[in-house]
Image: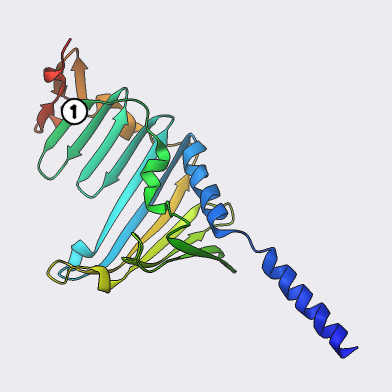
């Protein structure tokens, strides 16, 4: 009887282990939310632990807004806007707007390529706690990803990413350069309705007539650098 109960217990444990979600599949599902959701925005905060970084350089806040094939990525003094067939790179510190014609459509999963992990180079583990799901990925030795010790990706109950923490392996970093121990990104304030899309409007930044580009009233003190003047007919 005792052996029989032990066998049943082993089968229950084995069955529970077998039913654990595949962390790579959970990661793919999370990425597809960003790819296939047409309208959303979120704020995020990046924090890194690196040599020679002090004060404000240890963190950076940002915002991402998407509406269809248009998006704006605002990070510190830099802003990248893809809208109306144009790509704008705006540096608010140096007061420069670079304008070029956008080529093709944006593949949104490229914006999250930090999440792309090759099964041949990484082993994954699924965990769950009171705050939601956690996906843990550890790099295998002697692979292109060995400079990363591990990455932990936390999902909320709806499968959206709320945080990513990446730890770096110091053995794979050049001691003569700045060495980083970790990078964390916390995603917050997801919004899907009533988006403020002013950051996506081309007229917010510039006016374009043919190949002529001029700054909008709010950016008249910015230098305009345009590649449109070099286009061939």
Residue projecting furthest to the right: 1
Give the residue furthest to the front.
142
Q: Residue 84 occupies which quadrant of the picture?
A: top left
Q: Is residue 6 above or below residue 43?
A: below
Quadrant for the N terminus in the image: bottom right
Q: Residue 7 appears in which quarter of the rendering? A: bottom right
* Vertical relation: 71 (above or below) 29: above
40 relative position to 97: left or right: right
Write the residue at 18% across / 25% down. Answer: 216
**Viewed as shown, does residue 19 lie left or right of 140?**
right
Image location of residue 11, percent across then percent down: 78, 74
Which element is circle 1 on? strand
Looking at the picture, tell me which residue is in the foreground, 53 or 77: 53
Q: Position of residue 118 (x, y in %)?
A: 44, 54
Colour approach in the figure: rainbow
- Give the total of numbered labels: 1
Residue 33: x and y, percent?
Answer: 52, 43
Q: Can you name the residue that lies furthest to the top here?
A: 233
Of the 4 image quadrants, the one containing the C terminus is top left
- Residue drawn 12% across the image and 45% down it: 93
Residue drawn at 19 percent across, 37 percent down: 90
Q: Residues within 10 Å of mark 1 (few under 14, many from 20)?
A: many
Which x, y percent locates residue 25? 57, 53
Q: Residue at x 42, y 51 (%)?
A: 116
For disc 1, the marked residue is: 99
């Amino acid at each position: 009887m005792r052996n029989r109960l032990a066998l049943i217990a082993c089968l229950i444990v084995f069955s529970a282990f077998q039913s654990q979600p595949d962390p790579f599949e959970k990661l793919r599902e999370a990425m597809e939310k960003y790819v296939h959701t047409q309208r959303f925005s979120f704020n995020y905060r990046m924090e890194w632990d690196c040599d020679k970084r002090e004060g404000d350089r240890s963190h950076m806040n940002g915002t991402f807004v998407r509406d269809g094939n248009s998006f704006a990525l605002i990070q510190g003094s830099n802003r990248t806007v893809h809208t109306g067939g144009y790509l704008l790179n705006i540096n608010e510190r140096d007061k420069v707007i670079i304008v070029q014609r956008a080529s093709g459509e944006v593949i949104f999963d490229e914006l999250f390529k930090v999440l792309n992990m090759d099964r041949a180079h990484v082993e994954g583990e699924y965990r769950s706690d009171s705050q939601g799901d956690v996906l843990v990925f550890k790099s295998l030795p002697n692979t292109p990803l060995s400079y990363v010790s591990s990455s932990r990706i936390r999902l909320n109950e709806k499968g959206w990413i709320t945080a990513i923490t990446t730890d770096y392996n110091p053995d794979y970093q050049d001691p003569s350069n700045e060495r980083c121990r970790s990078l964390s990104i916390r995603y917050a304030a997801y919004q899907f309705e009533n988006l403020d899309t002013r950051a996506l409007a081309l007229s917010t930044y510039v006016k374009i007539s043919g190949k002529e580009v001029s700054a909008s009233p709010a950016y008249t003190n910015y230098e305009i650098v345009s590649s449109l003047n070099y286009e061939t007919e």
